[in-house]
Image (spheres, rainbow, N blue to C red):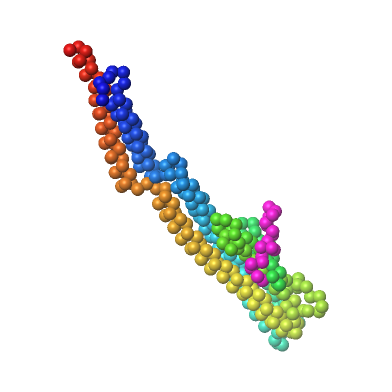
Amino acid sequence: MSLVINTNLMALNASRNLSEAYGRLGTSTRRLSSGLRVGTAADDAAGLAIRELMRADIASMRQGIRNANDAVSMVQTADGALQVIDEKLIRMKELAEQAATGTYNSDQRLIIDSEYQAMASEITRIANATKFNGIYLLNGNLSVSSDNQNPASWGGVHDGTGLDPTGPLKIHFGTGNDPKEDYYYIAIGNSTASALGLGSNRDISGGITAGHNISTQANAQQALDAINLAIISKDKMRAALGALQNRLENTITNLSIQAENLQAAESRISDVDVAQEMTQFVRNQILTQSAVAMLAQANALPRMAMQLIQG
């Protein structure tokens, strides 16, 4: 290599090496301070794309867990109201049993019937008043027709195009919009007294009086059968709600496991290995310090030419 003054090749080489080492040192510092291996797209373009998709799915799953938990709360609200209705039905059967015996006169049966009608009115009030977050649960708004008992077809009954959806309630918990994976519907029947076939407000066209009142001994005897059917209908609703709650809790468990494992996968892509990066940091720090020292030496080398000129 020639001894020249205008171009100091050794200084240029040392400067380039210093720039590269210092840049890698800056990258290691950023990774260690942020905890992220992939902080910018330049670090790992494919890894960044995969990570962001995973982050979106993780956020959706966690919201889906909250959605399912809200649905559990809603189901528990409906079941709690049906439990109260259950108590009213038991009392109504007790009153019907009392009125069905022959040891009471007509005036006494009318008094018994007044409490019977009050219980029926209370059942209707509970059904019309029970709501969760403004959504009425037991008044028939979430019900399906008796000939449409296939949950897979409830999507056709549900209408979510308006501000207030109608039909079976849609519970969305997945990351997409696939009915096999991401949502299902909850239908709750009408539990008013008239829908259960009880009370003076029910339709008695055709001469059907079973469950209408217990003002006579014959009506009281017929009411026993009607109340049994009402209790069975109510029990079917409670059983369906219990099954839905179990299903929702299983969904929550599954989503939690998925989110946890997806978070672990995202961490392997995105997070920095501190031990490995610290090793690189020390290496780049030493190279940077060495390059600074050599650059200082390289800048001093042209002075050798002055010694020749002065000699």
Residue drawn at point x = 56 percent, y = 70 percent: 243
Q: Position of 100 compared to 180: left or right?
A: right
Q: Magenta region: which residues? A: 149-166
- Asked if residue 279 is positioned above or below residue 108 in the image, the reply reads above
When asked about the image quadrant of residue 235, the answer is bottom right
Quadrant where the N terminus sits is top left
Q: Is residue 32 visible?
A: yes
Q: Residue furthest left?
A: 311
Residue positioned 67% across, 71% down in the render:
149
Residue drawn at x 79%, y 75% is: 204
Quadrant in the rendering for residue 297: top left
Q: Residue at x 69, y 63 (%)?
A: 156
Q: Which of these two is toward me, 235 or 85?
A: 235
In the drawing, does residue 103 fall left or right of residue 12? right
Q: Looking at the image, can residue 114 be seen?
A: no
- Left or right: where 176 falls relative to 36: right
Percent position (x, y) of residue 150? 65, 70
Say which of 219 and 173 sits in front.
173
181 part of magenta stretch: no
Which x, y percent locates residue 190?
68, 68
Type of secondary structure dominating the magenta stretch = loop
The answer to which of 291 and 160 lies nearer the viewer is: 291
Instruction: State the count of labels.
Output: 0
Image: 274 above or below 93: above
